Image: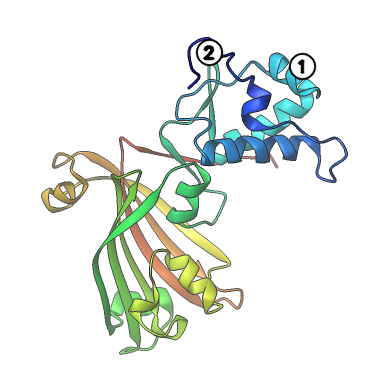
């Protein structure tokens, strides 16, 4: 916000100018500048970006450079295009199916402040279903995690995770991010299989997410695997349908 009589900052002054002498391509510099502006809340949800032509002229780059930079951020879910209106900072959280990342990483990259409320951290034995999914012997020890995930103080999802005990010393080893904890022990998933389906929230789930019972939601079931093929994570995440969008980039063969 500017004081009365002050000249508003130009868009390039808000996000920083590009450096033609820098090694990184100009479109990547622009992506980085916009990503940082969103993370630092210089650009907020639903803020409109200048038209591509105006942005190219102001930054001294080609429209092709601008289009390539914006296309990448749209595919990441940071920006959204509206027919006949232009390009805007995404208001709803958009999660890309093409990138294996944690909730914490997703929120920070989108300029949101994440935190969690732990409902339980527990050690137990693998169930018959988990045994098949994780490839563990009957009775093998596992750690289970249940929490509410928040962005900017608003509840976004319920998360239930199970990991084999070989992946970390104890359940308390996870402080904020499960993937961060797994990375510290060298057991962060290298790939994952995900399944998406629509659900209706139960009264118990709805109360935790401060929504109405039977409100629509999205369930993501994810199995994470190490490079050697061992399963290291099974997670069920129940996302609020009014706050989350899932996007995937598709390419023709």
Residue 76 versus residue 86 in the image, above or below: below
Question: Mark 2 falls on what kind of element?
Answer: loop
Residue at 53% from the left image edge and 9% from the top image edge:
5
Q: Position of residue 80 (x, y in %)?
A: 53, 28
Indicate which disc residue 83 carries. Answer: none
Residue drawn at (39%, 51%), measured in percent from left and top?
Answer: 114
Relative placement, left or right, of 213 versus 136 is left
**Residue at the disc numbered 1:** 57
Task: State the separation of the CA atoms marked 1 and 2.
Answer: 20 Å
User: Is 198 in front, or is 60?
Assistant: 60
Q: Earlier in the sequence, mark 1 or mark 2?
A: 1
Res. 249 in view: no
Give percent across and percent down for residue 157. Answer: 31, 50
Compared with residue 229, is residue 137 higher up or lower down, i.e. above or below? below
1 or 2: mark nearer the eye: 1
Residue 158: percent from left, percent from top: 28, 55
How many numbered tags mark residues here?
Answer: 2
Of residues 32 and 143, the one nearer the viewer is: 32
The answer to which quarter of the image holds residue 86 is top right
Q: Look at 66% across and 37% down and name the residue there.
A: 33
Instruction: Determine crowd level at label 1: few under 14, some 14-19, many 20+ residues with C-alpha closer than 10 A.
Output: few
Residue at the far right: name it: 21
At 32% from the left and 88% from the top, the residue drawn is 138
Q: Which residue position holds label 2?
A: 85
The quarter in which the C terminus is drawn is top right
Q: Is 206 located above or below residue 72 in the figure?
A: below
Return the x and y of residue 68 as percentages of the image width and height. 72, 31
Q: Secondary structure at mark 1?
A: helix
């Amino acid at each position: 916000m500017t004081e009365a009589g002050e000249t508003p900052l130009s868009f390039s002054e808000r996000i920083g100018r590009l450096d033609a002498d820098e090694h990184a391509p100009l479109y990547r510099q622009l992506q980085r500048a916009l990503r940082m502006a969103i993370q630092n809340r210089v650009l907020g949800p639903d803020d409109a970006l200048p038209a591509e032509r105006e942005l190219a002229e102001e930054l001294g780059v080609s429209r092709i450079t601008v289009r390539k930079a914006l296309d990448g951020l749209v595919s990441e879910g940071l920006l959204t295009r509206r027919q006949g209106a232009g390009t805007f900072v995404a208001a709803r959280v958009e999660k890309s199916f093409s990138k294996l990342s944690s909730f914490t990483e997703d929120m920070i990259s989108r300029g949101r402040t994440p935190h969690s409320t732990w409902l339980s951290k527990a050690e137990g034995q693998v169930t018959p279903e988990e045994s098949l999914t994780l490839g563990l012997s009957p009775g093998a020890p596992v750690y289970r995690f249940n929490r509410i995930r928040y962005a900017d103080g608003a509840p976004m999802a319920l998360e239930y995770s199970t990991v084999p005990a070989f992946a970390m010393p104890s359940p308390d080893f996870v402080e904020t991010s499960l993937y961060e904890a797994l990375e510290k022990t060298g057991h962060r998933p290298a790939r994952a299989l995900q399944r998406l389906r629509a659900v209706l929230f139960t009264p118990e789930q709805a109360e935790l997410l401060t929504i109405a019972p039977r409100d629509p939601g999205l369930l993501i079931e994810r199995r994470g695997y190490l490079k050697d093929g061992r399963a290291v994570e099974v997670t069920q995440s129940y996302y609020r349908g009014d706050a989350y969008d899932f996007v995937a980039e598709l390419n023709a063969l």
